[in-house]
Each structure stands twice: as C-alpha cells, then as structure tokens.
Amino acid sequence: MHTRLTTLAIAFVAFAAVPSQAVPLQTPQGPVLLTVTGNIAHTNATGRAEFDRAMLDALPQHTTTATTPWYDTAQSFTGPEALALLELVGASGTTVTVTALNDYSADIPFADFENYRIILANQIDGQPLSVRDKGPSFVIYPFDQDEELYNEVIFGRSVWQVTSIAVK
C-alpha cells in the first residue's frame, strides 16, 4: 500500500511539473475582425489565428484616456491588451507588422508591447468603433502616461482600421 501511494505521489508530481498544452483557440462564430499570422504557435485556421468581436472582448480589457492628434479632446479608449493577444497566439519575434483595411501598415517593435500598455481599442468613450470612426480596432499607446510617446514615430505606429497582424 505504501509503495502504491508513493508511486501515485511521484506520478502526480511528475505530471504537475510538465506544463499543460495551451487551450486551443476557439473558432470565430461571427465575422472575422482580426487575423494574426507569422511566428505564432497557436492557430485556429491554417497558418493563422482568427478573431471575431466576442473573442477579442474575452481578452483582458484596458481603458486609457489619451490626447491624440486625431481627436480635438482627450478620449477614453477601451480594448484588449495587445500583449495578451500576442501571448495567446504564442507570438515570438522582434517586429509586429500591423495592417489596416486600406493596406497601410506599420512595423512595431515587439518590445513596445512589452514596455507599454498598448491596446487594440475597439471602443471610444464607451461606444463601439465603427470603420468610419477608425474601427474595428485602433492601436493606442498610453500617450498621456508617457510624454515621450507623443511623437511622429509613435503616431505612425498607431494604425487604425486594423485587420491583420504579422509577427516576424
């Protein structure tokens, strides 16, 4: 009996020490708003991870109030934390290319996502961002929390109408 309990305890410790496999990404049930490709470990379609609104809303959300060059007054932006999305898909790389509906794209250093609380805003002042209002997603840096971010380089990385992300 003692040997059997010892064997069970050793087996339990051994299995507990092995990291579990990530839960597979669910399949979008609604229209796909964002596609992530490139150096990612977790997908839900061939070679890519696709997200609908519900999947993006299920990620950790953050709200930041920021003064930007695109609006006359400070706005409250809400959306998923970009780093949480990158971690969910198992992203690894040095650069993240974010592309908009009109094919405008910007390369963002992966380190920016680790160093700043960047969000993929899908709401402004509590209202969903429509395509007309720079939606469905808008890369928002915490401009008002770090004055060094308020510059042309970061403005160029603040892609709106985001449809895809490629991790390199």
Image (spheres, helix red, strand yellow):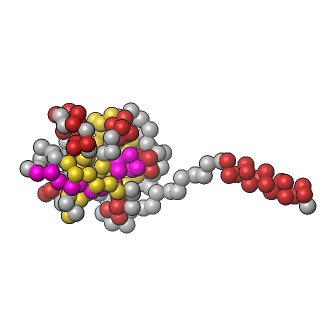
Magenta span includes 50? no
Q: What's the residue at 91%, 61% (across, down)? A: 1
Front one among 125 and 80: 125
Residue 124: x and y in percent read 20, 58
Residue 38 visible, this orientation: yes
Residue furthest bottom as drawn: 29
Q: What's the residue at 33%, 34% (across, down)? A: 109
Q: What's the residue at 52%, 56% (across, down)? A: 23
Q: Quadrant of residue 97?
A: top left
Q: For the magenta stretch, what is the residue range?
A: 73-85
Front one among 72 and 159: 72
Residue 46 visible, this orientation: no
Tag count: 0
- Viewed as shown, does residue 167 lie left or right of 122? right
Seen in the picture, residue 165 relative to 129 is either above or below; the reply is above
Residue 111: x and y in percent read 37, 35
Q: What's the residue at 15%, 51% (across, down)? A: 74
Residue furthest left as drawn: 72
Residue 56: x and y in percent read 35, 58
- Viewed as shown, does residue 37 lie left or right of 126? right
